[in-house]
Amino acid sequence: MSLHLRNEIDTLKQELLKMAGLAESAVARAMQAVETRDDALAKRVKGDDDTLDTLEIAIDEMGIQLLAKAPLASNLRLINAAMKISRDLERVGDEATSIARRALHLNVEPPLSLPEELGELLQCALEMLAQALDAFVNEDPVSARAIPPRDQHADALNKEIHRALISRMVTAPDTITRVVHVLVISKCLERIADHATNIAEDVVYLCEARDIRHMGKA
């Protein structure tokens, strides 16, 4: 690989990591806005999403240009993985924006106690996302393969939260509107875990040239 091509690929990776940091921060800020009822913080997440959209477009353009220059299959896989990961990160930003919008709706209503499992789901989703991104940086398929099984735990937490909240709507009908917002927030977090899983699968393909999607077991 030429030095010029190596530098261009390094720049692509750096832009992707910038995007990753923004996506992780957006999720954390959106959930903090929910927990602290902070309108200003929720509104900041929209700005994060605009930046993520811009970065996704830039990474796609860089990737398309590089695809014509990369002579090795490993480089082609890396460029393709970076472009796919950027799409998942952009969608993580979309989920953060959805959470922030729900925070704004909740903040005009009386406070509602949040399920304890919601914090656990947030932690699970963010840990999965961070591990997937670390696996990409380190090109570590072993770490990446450990992520898809964790998605089952995220799914189970989301279902548990939904059961508890639906029960609350039945016993306290005056909370229905607020509970619906929290149900959506829980689903957003579950989807973020899904995106982390997608990234992990991309890392395995990058490192091993093996597609583990839809295999049910990594």
Image: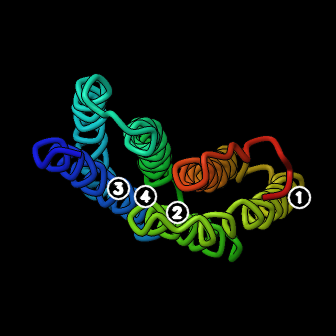
Count neighbours of disc 1 (C-alpha within 10 A) and say few if under 14, some if 14 to 19, many if 20 or more.
Answer: few
Up-down relation of residue 47 to residue 175 (above or below): above
Give the amino acid at mark 4.
Val
Q: Nearer the viewer, mark 3 or mark 2?
A: 2
- How crowded pointer 3 is (Cα within 10 Å; few <14, some 14-19, many 20+) is rated as many
- Disc 1 from disc 3: Cα separation: 36 Å
Q: Earlier in the sequence, mark 4 or mark 1?
A: 4
Position of residue 123 measured from the top left corner of the image (x, y, whole percent)? 57, 73
In the rendered image of this protein, does residue 49 appear above or below residue 208? Answer: above
The disc placed on residue 132 is: 2
**Sequence-first tag of 3 and 2:** 3
Q: Nearer the viewer, residue 218 or 114?
A: 218
Of label 1 and label 3, which has the lower sequence position?
Answer: 3
Which amino acid is tagged 3? Ala
Residue 16 pos. (x, y %): 30, 49
Residue type of the residue flagged with mark 1: Ser
Give the residue number, with chain letter if any, for mark 3. 20
Q: Which mark is residue 27?
A: 4
- Would you name the residue on which mark 1 appears? 167
Does the rendering let one see residue 101? no
- The amino acid sitting under disc 2 is Ala
Mark 4 and mark 1 residues within 8 Å of each other at the beta carbon: no
Question: Between marks 3 and 2, how big is the CA–CA gap?
Answer: 10 Å
Q: Secondary structure at mark 1?
A: helix
In the figure, residue 142 lies in which quadrant? bottom right
Choose between 211 and 153: the one closer to the eye.
211
**Inter-mark Cα distance, 2 to 4:** 16 Å
